[in-house]
Image: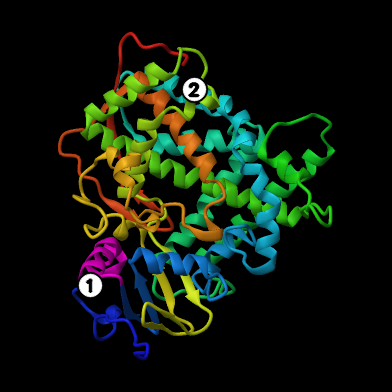
Amino acid sequence: MQPATLPPGPKGNVLLNREIDLRSNILQYLEKNVREYPGISRIKLGPFHYVIISDPEMIEQVFMNREVYVKGRDNDNLKFLLGNGLLTNQGDFWMKQRRLMQPLFHKQRLQGFVQKIEECTNDIMTEWKAMPHKTVDIHNEMMKLTLAIVSSTLMSTNVGGEFRKVSDALTVVMEGMIDRTRSFVRLPYWLPTGRNMRMKLNRKTLDATILSIINNRRKDSKTYDDLLTMLMEVEDADTRERMTDTQLKDEVITIFLAGHETTANAMSFAFYLLAQHPEVRGKINEEVNRVTTGDAMTYEQLNKLEYTTMVIKEAMRLYPPAWGILREAAKDDVLNGHLIKKGDSIVLPPYAVQRSERYWPEPEKFDPERFSAERMKGVHRYAYFPFGGGARLCIGNNFAMMEMQIIMALICRQFSFSLPPDFKLELDALVTLRPRNGLQLVLKQEVGTPTNI
């Protein structure tokens, strides 16, 4: 048997290479690296080593081996915001929380949220219809919409009051985290810099506000059909224990971030693609007309929106909100004959893998029907992984898909889209993948379509 060897990769420290600007071109670098080093490569970045894995078989091994590939030093940045929420914790505590929360996101529990999502979407379309000029920043509009949806489904409240404080404080903390993400020198949080002090103050506001909402809910005698109530009532099957207020707070912040930011980004890019492919929007409209009856949508109807679902999947193939997934090797390991050393950071890049011609024919082409059952035969399950994989597959993936199906079906039923002249999309690979400087679209209200589907 051949001894394991370190993965191939560029010589020298990438950080010192003047031809590479990772701060503004990380996506292009990942694509280039995956082309030049198919499957796996190892680079030195400052004092650390990063292993970039693009082979689906090896990606699967990383996802499945949680004992070796753990959340590492890059996870600490997220922990400042999310605490010990499901996204950041690990080990036995993660397993306990995952087991507690999994039933909340089963499909039968999600049916009650269809109407809330539909109402929020109809509200924003009513605003659009009242606009004299229908050129909008669709990213800003989707951020408004998903904020309304997460406030309604998570806490049964409209955007405003305490929930607005949560959103504003979260925005400040996120901006600070984004600045840290862009910086290769990350000063410790205890240093009293202006940024650190703003982040700490708003994190304190965030914690206090959510704990106040939880405390008030415990005293409220009303019955609420929302995720907060489900989180408060869920019990461990063995111990009958419920979550502490601190656990509830961390999970609420995690759900807020995941249900707000990532969905808004995914839908923004989807509508950007539809603006360039009006025939695809037409097919969505035809399917929605065929499946629905003009009344309120039902959960059962969503399962029949097959083409609409393919469009969403194709949009997330090209523009995955989670553009890079990080792990750290807790001990030495071997992947396909390559030595992975303890302490190496592992990069699993959905953006680069899902645009690789090794796994996708004509990868730059927007082709929703590539996700038909027939054409997906033979495609490795980890050639496409926008929601992660393994035991840590995003717990809210079913909720997110349902939300996106409803938004796309409703909006495509009443509006078509086009790009303003000379618009050029620029990408920001920050905590999530988002459009830089917004995403302008021209909306056109379609005549003769029902206003309440």
376 or 150, which lies in front?
376
Crowding near the residue tagged with mark 2, few <14, some 14–19, many ≥20 C-alpha atoms within 10 Å: few
182 or 98, which lies in front?
98
Q: Residue 251, how many percent across, how many down?
A: 65, 52
Q: Residue 331, how many percent across, how many down?
A: 52, 83
Q: Residue drawn 57% across and 46% down?
A: 256
Which disc is residue 306 wearing?
none
Residue 86 placement, left or right of 8: right
* Residue under numbered circle 2: 123
Q: Is residue 342 above or below residue 270?
A: below
Q: Residue drawn 71% across and 56% down?
A: 247
Q: Residue drawn 37% across and 20% down?
A: 413
Q: Of the residues under marks 1 and 2, which one precedes in the sequence?
A: 1
Crowding near the residue tagged with mark 1, few <14, some 14–19, many ≥20 C-alpha atoms within 10 Å: some
Residue 194 in sight in this render: no
The image shows a total of numbered marks equal to 2
- Is residue 28 located in the magenta-colored stretch of the structure? yes
Identify the magenta region. Answer: 20-39
* Residue under numbered circle 1: 20
What secondary structure characterizes most of the magenta part? helix
Q: Residue 151, how many percent across, how many down?
A: 60, 36
